[in-house]
Image: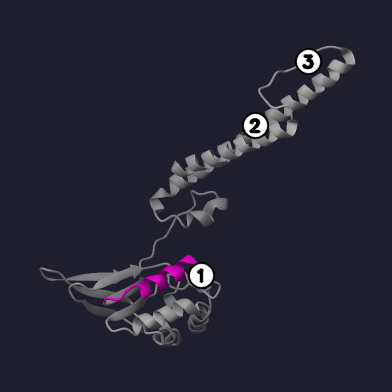
Amino acid sequence: MPGRRTLPVPYGHHVYVVSDLALSPQSDPNGRAPRELAELLGGLDDPAVVIVAGGLFAPPEGAPPGPFVAETLATLSPLAGALRAFTDRAGHQILVLPGASDHGLLSDPAAQGELAAYGVAVARDVVLQVATADDVRDVVVAAGVSEVDDSVVDPRDRADARRVEDASALPRFAASRLLYRRLAAWVWLPVVAFVLLDLWSLFSVVADHLVHHHYRIHLLTTRSFWANLAAVLVVVAAAETALAALAGWL
C-alpha cells in the first residue's frame, strides 16, 4: 500500500494542489474539471509538481477501482493525453492522494497501475521540503474529509447545500432559500390583480352598453388586455430575479 512521499522542492519550483474533481466515465470531456486540469498541465513549462489532494475520481459504491479508472481515462482522452505529456517532461510530477470518494485507490494495485501508465503516482500524503531564500521548510499535504450537516436545510435543497464550500454558511443558505420560497408565491399577486381589474373593465364596458350605467375603472394600462399581461409578466420576471438575488445575498 502506498505510504507517505517526501519530495524536495528546489527554490523557484512550483507546487499546485487541486482536489474534488470527481471524474467518472460519465464526465464530459469538455466539462470544467477535466478541461481546466488539462489546461493547467499544458500551461506549465517550468519544473512543477501537481498534487490532487482527494476526490480525483468518484466511483459508485462497490465499483472495482481498476476498471473504473481505466474507463474514466479512456473517456477523458484529452485529459489523459495532458497527463502523459506533462509527466514525460523532466521535472514534472503528478501525485494523487486518495480521499473519501476514491479511498480504494490506496489498496488497489490495478488502479495504481492504470495511473502509473500515465506517469501518475499514488500516495497516502506528501511532505514537501520547500527550499526558501532562508531555509528549508516542511509542508505536509493530505486529503481532508469534511462532514456537512445538512439537516438544517430543506430536503429539496440538500443537493445544492452539499456544494456549499463553507459549511458554516449553511444556516444562511437555508434561510435564503426559505425566504425565497415564502416570497416567491406573492410575486404573482400583481398579475392576478391586473387580470381581475382588466376583466372588471371589460365587464363595465358590457354593462354600460346593456344598462347604460358606468362602472369604469381608469387604469394606467394600455387598451389591450394581452399587452397589459405581457407588461406585467416582464415586471414579475424582474421581481423574481431581484428576489432570487436578494435571497442569495442573505
Q: Give whichever of 120, 161 is nearer the camera.
A: 120
Instruction: List the residue tagged with mark 1.
Output: 30
Q: Which mark is residue 215?
A: 3
- The answer to whether the residue labelled 2 contacts the one labelled 1, judged by CB atoms less than 8 Å apart, is no
Q: Position of residue 217 (x, y in %)?
A: 72, 18
User: Which amino acid, by three-letter code, is at mark 2?
Assistant: Leu
**What's under tag 3, amino acid-wise?**
Tyr
Q: Please provide the residue range marked out in magenta.
A: 29-46
Question: Which residue extends farthest left?
Answer: 134
- Determine if the magenta segment contains residue 33: yes
User: Which class describes the residues within 10 Å of circle 3: few (<14), some (14-19), or many (20+)?
Assistant: some
Residue 52 placed where, x, y %?
A: 37, 72
Left or right: 192 as drawn, with respect to 137: right
Task: Determine the residue positioned at 45% across, 76% down.
Answer: 79
Q: Is residue 205 visible?
A: yes
Return the disc, 3 or 1, that comes first in the chain's sequence.
1
